[in-house]
Amino acid sequence: MDLLLQQVLGYAKAAWRRRWWGVAVAWLVCIVGWTWVMTIPDRYQATARVYVDTQTLLKPLLSGLAAEPNVEQQIKLMTRQLVSRPTLEKVARMTDLDVKAKTPEQTEKMLNALAAKISIADAGRENLYTISYQDANGELAKKVVQSLLTIFVESSLGKTRQDISSSQRFIEEQLQQYQQKLTDAENALKEFKQKHIGMMPGQGGDYYAKLAEASALLRQAQLDQQEAVNRRNQLKRQLQDEEPELTAAAAAMSTNGEIDARIQALEKQMDQLRLQYTDLHPDIQATRRLIEKLEQQKKSELAARKSDPAGTKIQNPVYQQLTIAIAEADATVASLNARVGEYQRRLSELRSASNMIPQVEQEYTQLTRDYDVYRQNYDALLKRRESVTMSGEVESKTDTVDFRVIDPPFVPSQPAWPNRPLLLSLVTVGGLLAGIAVAFLLSQLRRTVNDRRTLRELTGLPLLGGVSRVETDETRRRKRKGLLTYLAALGSLIAAYGGVMILQLIMSRAG
């Protein structure tokens, strides 16, 4: 720490020896800077504040029904567009600045200067904007701000309507295109259904379901066929054990046994009916008549047997019944054979169409997918069109954005630039710092040894001793005189700064 302090003190002593150069540089910088500051032309700033109210009553009421543009984003975009070239050209025409520009180079220079002087910024609150412009002519600055304010309001009012109109045109064009696509898809789907009727998915199941169903029906039919064949063969074997003809006595006994069995069954049936109905019920009457008829048949057969004791041959009723059952079994087998053949034919057709039906299903799926997509997009565009139409009505008949000019364009009597007191102070401080820097640089260019330690470090030789300087009265008097002269030079610089500040104050009040 001591070493660093010694180095700083050494640099200060070296710069002190070049102090007159520093004073001269400080005076030179201050005189040039003060002159430049006093000759800077005044510039007046015109300012206007506008508030954009986006919180309207219709916004929550029309939520979900009308399209809600991002008003905040549009406002920010419009503030950036105010410094665009088309806007600057329009402002130049409105303020007659373009009259002074005779050549393209002058026009470009004028537009660049105009853009550099325009300032658009938030005023510290949401949707509150400040538009300002600086120029040597206060009236011209006021005209420029008024032109920017007019363009800002007009562009914001027409931008939403223009966007809604272009959106409506785009949606109408897309609706026409999708309507044509939807019609073409419907026609293609109709022709495809007509061409492949019976093979469409959903008509009795898809191909694999139909194939599995046909296989199951074929197996069931083959099983029924085998059962019918077995039953027919069994009936044929039973027929071989029966005689075609019987004696009358045997036939009567066989017939009487059958008649008795039928009579017993009918009597049981009539008992069941009597539990539910009276004896006058038609079913009970019919059953009673049938029983009486069987009784008469039984008596007649007994009388016939007594009248023919010789034993005349008659046909065996069991044989006849077996013959009839065999005929019915043959018919059943034939029917099942036809059914098995039909199922085999269907199965063969499905297997032969194994390459065609999946292709049909794939094409049908693709057609329906395209149709569904076109339909969904068409319905969505219809909803969007209604939403945009309602938004257009809202925009044309109401004010979704309310522009309020809080402060109209105003130009203060005092110039906004330059801030001469501040600049004069900065020039004075800069001159003093420049003088110190020059004195330090000169001391480093022509360095001197200030103490024994520095000499020993520079030479690397041992230091045997030192000779002190003896100050006389004359040398001390000259030192005091030089110090007073130096302080007078600095004081005069400070006094000159004060005089310049007073002069600036007087000029500002007079202006």
Image: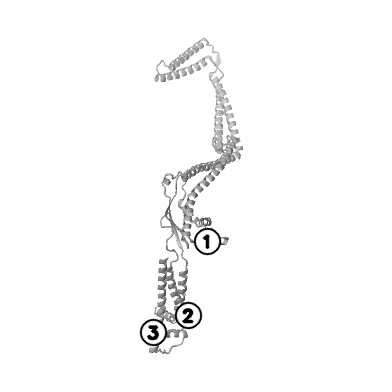
Who is closer to the viewer here, 257 or 142? 142
Task: Inspect the image, locate mark 2, and give the three-letter code of the amino acid beneath it.
Answer: Leu
Residue denoted by label 1: 112
Horizontal placement of 310 versus 291: left or right?
right
Question: Residue 480 bears which disc, if any?
Answer: 3
At a point 41% along the width and 83% down the height, the residue shown is 482
Residue 368 appears in which quarter of the rendering? top right
Residue denoted by label 2: 442
At a point 52% along the width and 16% down the height, the residue shown is 251
Considering only vertical position in the picture, is 154 above or below 111? above
Mark 1: which secondary structure? helix
Alpha carbons under labels 3 and 1: distance apart? 58 Å
How packed is label 3: few (under 14 Cα within 10 Å), some, or many (20 or more)? few
Alpha carbons under labels 2 and 3: distance apart? 24 Å
Q: Position of residue 6 (x, y in %)?
A: 41, 80
Who is closer to the viewer here, 501 or 17? 501
Mark positioned earlier in the residue sequence (2 or 3): 2
Residue extending farthest right:
352
Alpha carbons under labels 1 and 2: distance apart? 44 Å
Task: Inspect the image, locate mark 1, and give the three-letter code of the amino acid beneath it.
Answer: Asn
Is residue 378 among what the camera can see? yes
Horizontal placement of 341 versus 257: left or right?
right
Mark 3: which secondary structure? helix
